[in-house]
Amino acid sequence: MGKKVHLDSVRRLVASTPVFKARDVELVVGDKNYALLMLHNLAKRGEIHRVTRGWYSRADDPVVAVFALAPAYLGLQEALSCRGLWEQESNVVVVTPGKAKPGIRFSMGSRVVVHRIDPRYFFGFDYVPYGEFSVPVSDVEKTLVDLIYFAESPGAEVVRELIERCDEKVLRMYLSRYPTTFVSRFNKESGMS
């Protein structure tokens, strides 16, 4: 009876959030070893998926890695995809001011590219519906700034489309937070002046 109650409680936890920690399950069941066994069994049955060390999700989608790396947002090519500006298949790209090691990681069999950004430049994102939940995604203006900041080029046509969709007032406000050397580089590479 007790184990059934724990299993139901853990399933309610899993259903209530896009990602959760192994520690959350431990708090529900009251025992670390039993929590790890329960996570193993749920993953084996396909009810949950391992996102990264100590993090799990009911969704079988590497996009949820953004929650495990919080504070963070989906940026660059992934933001273009989420905003309907990029049709190509791309890796999940997460931008974070946290201490996560930048580079490529693997989550649920897919690549997740992690970029670290100075906390002063961590702004310009909102939550966009994605399946059963909403994910933090950089807005169009911040995506354009980040593409140049991280020296990523999705191609001239995509950059032109981004510039057309940008609110120039918002873009200038974002650029005012960066050093003048970057603003000059941005103007040169984007073709704006």
Image (cartoon, rainbow, N blue to C red):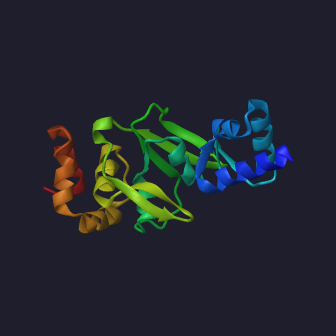
Please give the name of the residue rendered at 48% of the width and 49% of the height, measured from the top-left corner. Answer: 93
| Residue 110 image offset from top left, x and y in percent | 62, 50
In the picture, which quadrant includes the C terminus? bottom left
Name the residue furthest left: 193
Name the residue furthest front: 1
Name the residue furthest right: 1
Residue 25 seen in the figure: yes
Please give the name of the residue rendered at 47% of the width and 56% of the height, measured from the top-left corner. Answer: 135
| Residue 59 image offset from top left, x and y in percent | 64, 56
Q: Is residue 130 above or below residue 153?
A: below
Residue 53 seen in the figure: no
Please give the name of the residue rendered at 64% of the width and 39% of the height, measured from the top-left corner. Answer: 24
Q: Please state which of residues 88 and 146 is positioned toward the viewer in this rendering.
A: 146
Is 154 left, or right, of 168 in this rendering?
Answer: right
Labels in figure, total: 0
Q: Please state which of residues 187 and 57 is positioned toward the viewer in this rendering.
A: 57
| Residue 97 image offset from top left, x and y in percent | 39, 37
Q: Is residue 95 above or below residue 142?
A: above
Please give the name of the residue rendered at 16% of the width and 46% of the height, measured from the top-left corner. Answer: 176
